[in-house]
Image (spheres, coloured by chain):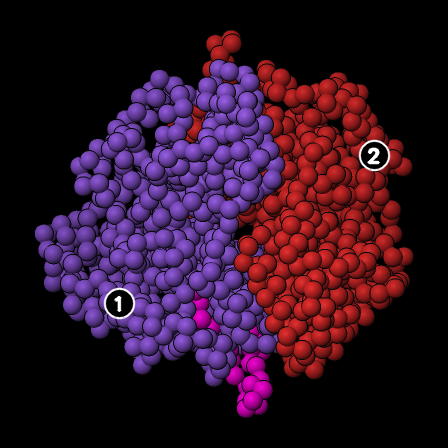
Chain colours: A purple, B red
Amino acid sequence: MNSLKMNEQNNKYREQDKNALYSNNDDKISMDRLATFCKRKSIFFQSSYIYGGLSGFYDYGPIGTKMLDKLISLWKNYFFFMNQKIGINMHEMSCADIMPENVFIASQHTKRFNDLVAVCAKNHVQRADHLIEQELQNKGINITNLSLEGKSKEELFSIIKENNIKCPICGSKIKEIRAQNLMFGLYVGTENKKAYLRPETAQSAFVNFKLIYEANRKKLPFAISIIGKAYRNEISPRKLLLRMREFNQAEIQIFFNPSDFDNFINFDEIKDYKLNILLADDRTQNTINFKKVKCRDLINRFEKFYLYYLAKIQSFYIDVLKIDSERFRFYEMNEKEKAFYNIYHCDIQLKLNTNSWTEVAGLHYRGDHDLSGHDKLSKESFKIKDEKTNNYFIPHVLELSFGLDRNLFALIDLAYYYDKDRDNVVLRLNKHLSAYNVAVFPLLTNKTELVEKARQIYLNLIKLGLYNVFFDIKGSIGRRYARQDEIGTPYCITVDFDTLKDDTVTVRYRDSKKQERIKLNYLNDWLNKEFKLHFSWI
Amino acid sequence: MNSLKMNEQNNKYREQDKNALYSNNDDKISMDRLATFCKRKSIFFQSSYIYGGLSGFYDYGPIGTKMLDKLISLWKNYFFFMNQKIGINMHEMSCADIMPENVFIASQHTKRFNDLVAVCAKNHVQRADHLIEQELQNKGINITNLSLEGKSKEELFSIIKENNIKCPICGSKIKEIRAQNLMFGLYVGTENKKAYLRPETAQSAFVNFKLIYEANRKKLPFAISIIGKAYRNEISPRKLLLRMREFNQAEIQIFFNPSDFDNFINFDEIKDYKLNILLADDRTQNTINFKKVKCRDLINRFEKFYLYYLAKIQSFYIDVLKIDSERFRFYEMNEKEKAFYNIYHCDIQLKLNTNSWTEVAGLHYRGDHDLSGHDKLSKESFKIKDEKTNNYFIPHVLELSFGLDRNLFALIDLAYYYDKDRDNVVLRLNKHLSAYNVAVFPLLTNKTELVEKARQIYLNLIKLGLYNVFFDIKGSIGRRYARQDEIGTPYCITVDFDTLKDDTVTVRYRDSKKQERIKLNYLNDWLNKEFKLHFSWI
């Protein structure tokens, strides 16, 4: 593609972005349009796109990579601090993605980590639930009340037969529904040992439990946190970052003695805190998105420690990430829906513009499922002596599991705003999540003394290693502001002729467009103040 | 294993560490002993060890994970700043590890990324060069002068025949030498599309070149940096983190027009800088580790830009990481040895206590090998118009490639010091690389007011999100200092009864054991000063 065509295409993309919003009531943007925007701004795009890519694999560009870093950093600061404060030591690990087969036999992933697929007479394979949803919709049937999660092979097959659903690829009959395992298998070494790419980071924490228990001086509770990749060979990856085959997880596994964990939690602190929650029972009423329920009114349903973590997670989304409270809810899974290893299972859902209520995280009470499995199959014992009763027990696990890509996608979706006055997108991200903390410009780009002064300020800032700073000397000052608005940079600093005289610069705010003058020698302190984390409410 | 046995085992390990050093002249420690130490201190250990693990896969424990983070941060700050300063924009990306087959057909990895293996009559497979080295050593032959790198199948086979080398597993004859590909292959989706785990992060940069070139406003040079995992199905992984099957890379790919790249480099700045380099020609003289050669005296051998980056890399190791100059060298690969894609190829080697000269990084001038390959095979054109000559050309690539695990291993190896006076290991790491910036203790652990005061200082510090802080209330103060010495914490802060009166604390320095008293309200400023990065010499 030559450079002229490229400009035309970029202009076309910009036009599409604009039309998308005008035609959809400002707060509705389609998934496709968001994809176009994210590719144009180097946030994310299909991996290996020059070869047509593989479904479900994405690369983060320079802007997205920085946003992902910032999200990780904010998440880590909040949840590590929150846990350390109540005396739960946080042990972060960085572990191999490839793990031997026995790990997943013990965890039952080889047997149970399956999706049900529909296979047609000509052997086309599709996820059975997606096929049913799609074909019923094509037939004009309202599927709002349809819930396929947790349905058996037989149940799905009868829905297919009843509705005469055929293979959409070739039109032939669906001959069977079968379970297909979702792990990527591979072979290691010249002996071809069977191994898998881990389908969740959690197993890396479980197999290392005993080592870290010892590093924690044999005291419970403690937590292992892993921020890393997981891999699932999804039957039908879709919706951009919402269902990927290779994805980034941020997880905390808390190991505890179920007989005393509630002692570590100050339930009084949160008893009147209202959770946004859609309980499994309330889901029969389709008009309710969620109810606001005090933690104390849920103690017959969940353990106190579980409610404590629900409250802290909600506070993270509402108070730290600044998500509109009406767009946040917990979604309780019922017996059939919840993952095979869970005792309690609430998803965290955000209401997106592109995708309505969307799962971005989960709080999973896994009981002793995982450690018991490894206790049975491995060489290590996972039994711990309870000092009070002298009985041996296997610690329980509470898992905080966050899909980093999904959360990032959600934050971009919610921040995307077309400002008619500016005729430009403003990505109204939380300033702690913007790719760049600040941009530095000379007012005029053809004046060497301004360019040099701005460049010096920029170099002095990046040298600190604390901030991401964008330096821009191309185009009018308005165009440069607009480019920063699009990627959500909260502050722009402009160097003009007054700067050369009195060492002051203009700070321009992204959302208000307000400008103010500050002293250059105050710049570091000002940035320090602006980007300091405040978790005073924890 | 019960808790009594565990303590015995830990005591045994400690005893082994001590003996290792006493019996080996203080600066020699064996690979096995370092492995024991690193497992005991939760730095790194075999992954999935409870199932016997898989060779070549390691997990980082809480201490190692923090060290790795710090190394990445220091590396990134230095090299990003260094490049930005000379006007090369740094674009960091985070990309999928799984890539479609075409990527590696274009890069020639499917065809040429092989090791030669010896196969015996009973089909045992071993890396041919390792087999020869090992068997010749077993026969008492001195292999110091033996260089097998770059030898052909036929050459290796005749060495095997000449020396009558048999399979060490079953004693049978070696029947053939064949090439074995080192990539992990897998299949994606219900269509079973062939894909690979990337064997180097670099290909993720190359396939995205055109997108980032546009994001960089079609200006050369610019750089893509990727910090992430790469995977190689090594025939015989060994030596802990020095040859892994899954490993962490930090890479920078600089894309440039070969006709003008030297203009971006200030050669005068480094012309008298002396490089520690072992040139290919000088390697016939076995007594020389390296020569110290001025950059200006190498301009007939390398391009100026290549020398500039050699100088900056050496400065990173010597001035930033503080590696003893006598333990750093560049090792120039000759025509036969260098990787198939390289025009110039110098390894960065550090002289370790466990492993003598060890490759930890490389500076690779890859020419247009990669972009040409993708230009031919993909849908995208990688040709760029030279504005001066109006000719189209394919940009060249200079690759800075760092093995993060190898570097971390090297830094631990070099920092490990058994202090006879303390009767304890002191990990004399660069303070910017230590897992914890600082530890906080109450002097006495049974005095509530001291414990509470110390705890408050600790929580206030971690709340900032800037420092890793260890809080310890177990054991005597001497024992707590010793534990921090072992993991390299540069400063310990102790709260005593004076603290309650005058708000001062004791700071104790790791290496000198010197103690001084500082005001609590000066603590943040003091830490800020101690951990500020200084790259004034760049």
Classify A489 as above or below A334: above
Quadrant location of the N terminus of chain A in the rendered image? top left
Query: In the image, which residues are magenta?
Result: A378-400
> Mark on residue A292?
1
Q: Quadrant of residue B38 in the image?
A: bottom right
Give the farthest residue toward the bottom. Answer: A389
| Residue B231 appears left or right of A168 | right
The number of numbered discs placed on residues in the rendered structure image is 2
State the residue position of label 2. B290
Q: Is residue A105 visible?
A: no
The residue carrying pointer 2 sits among few (fewer than 14), some (14 to 19) or many (20 or more) residues within 10 Å by Cα, namely some
Question: Label 2 sits on what residue type?
Answer: Phe
Q: CA distance from mark 1 to mark 2?
A: 71 Å
Q: Position of residue A431 (x, y in %)?
A: 42, 45
| Most frequent secondary structure within the magenta stretch | loop
Q: Position of residue B496 (x, y in %)?
A: 71, 69
Q: Position of residue A331 (x, y in %)?
A: 29, 65
Give the farthest residue toward the left. Answer: A140
Q: Closest to the observer: B44 or A353?
A: A353
Q: Quadrant of residue A351 in the image?
A: bottom left
Question: Label 1 sits on what residue type?
Answer: Lys
Q: Is residue B495 found inside the magenta-colored segment of the image? A: no
- Which residue occupies 35% across, 34% down? A513
Q: Is residue B390 visible?
A: yes
